[in-house]
Amino acid sequence: MNQIREAARIARSLSLAGSSEELWSTLKAFAAPFGFTHLTVMKRHPELPRVVAPAIVYIDAPEDFAADFDRQRFGQNHPLILQALTQLTPFSAGELPASQLSAEQRRVLRHVGSTLNMRDGWTFPIAYCGEMRGIMMLGGPAPDMSPLLASLLHLLTHTAFKRFEELAAGASPRSRLLTAREVECLRWVALGKTDEEIGVILSIRARTARFHVENAKRKLGVATRVQAVAQALKQQAIAA
């Protein structure tokens, strides 16, 4: 329960971050106690996976890592990047069967693992309404790979990337139709949470959670919670 409450607090901070530096440092501060020491953020780029450096928004790596990565043409053989470009659901490095990887793909993973000190981690494809927007990777030498934490990180990476795009476009979160609390409640509705559960997560009363959801429905011009989530996704007020 403490993880969920802390994730909710971090989600609020991410949605209001004033700079990209604040975004990545806030996300890393949440992930670090669970053994995640590395973060890579990539935006959609037409040359991915052949060329990686122009797509990188943030990376914990030596200064020349990305340029050297491209010089050795590792991108086209990086199995995590290749898989992230073809699916929308998160996956772990451990889910890639070694027997199905080519010798070059295994070499790329060994290079990345040794250079960045990563043995496992999560890859989060970032997509809105089925459209690929970017890739975020969190890893470390021995990270906590529990399902609950993975779900929380999934939510936080999408929140962070959405705010990154807003900052890049010069947008302010307060200019959106929905309030930050309404967006927050809808995110949890999208994950199947009831008003009572949202109340516990956000440390508010169930009726207060319901009030925010009802306000969001009214503003979005819909009749049901499911429609509210669908409309919020369409407007990119919440991440898929």
Image: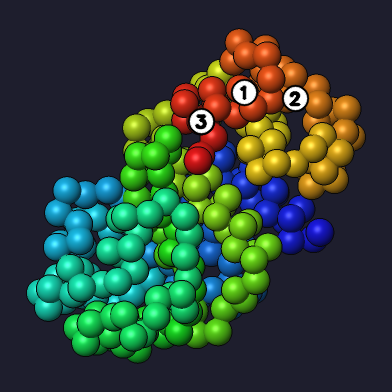
Q: At x 41% / y 85%, what residue is drawn?
A: 117
C-alpha span from label 1 to label 3: 8 Å
Residue 152 visible: yes
The CA distance from mark 2 to mark 1 is 12 Å
Left or right: 25 as drawn, with respect to 107: right
Q: Mark 3: which amino acid?
A: Leu
Residue at horizontal 29%, vertical 80%?
101
Q: Which residue is mark 3?
A: 233
Quadrant assignment, res 84? bottom left
SS of the residue at dot 1?
Answer: helix
Colour scheme of this structure image? rainbow
Estimate the spatial distance between the alpha carbons at disc 3 and disc 2, rounded to whole Å: 17 Å
Residue carrying label 1: 228
**Label 2 sits on residue:** 212
> How many badges with numbers are in the image?
3
**Which residue ends up furthest to the left in the rendered image?**
71
Residue type pointed to by label 1: Ala
State the image coordinates of residue 158 (x, y, percent, origin top left): 50, 47
Name the side, left or right, on which 77 lies relative to 15. Answer: left
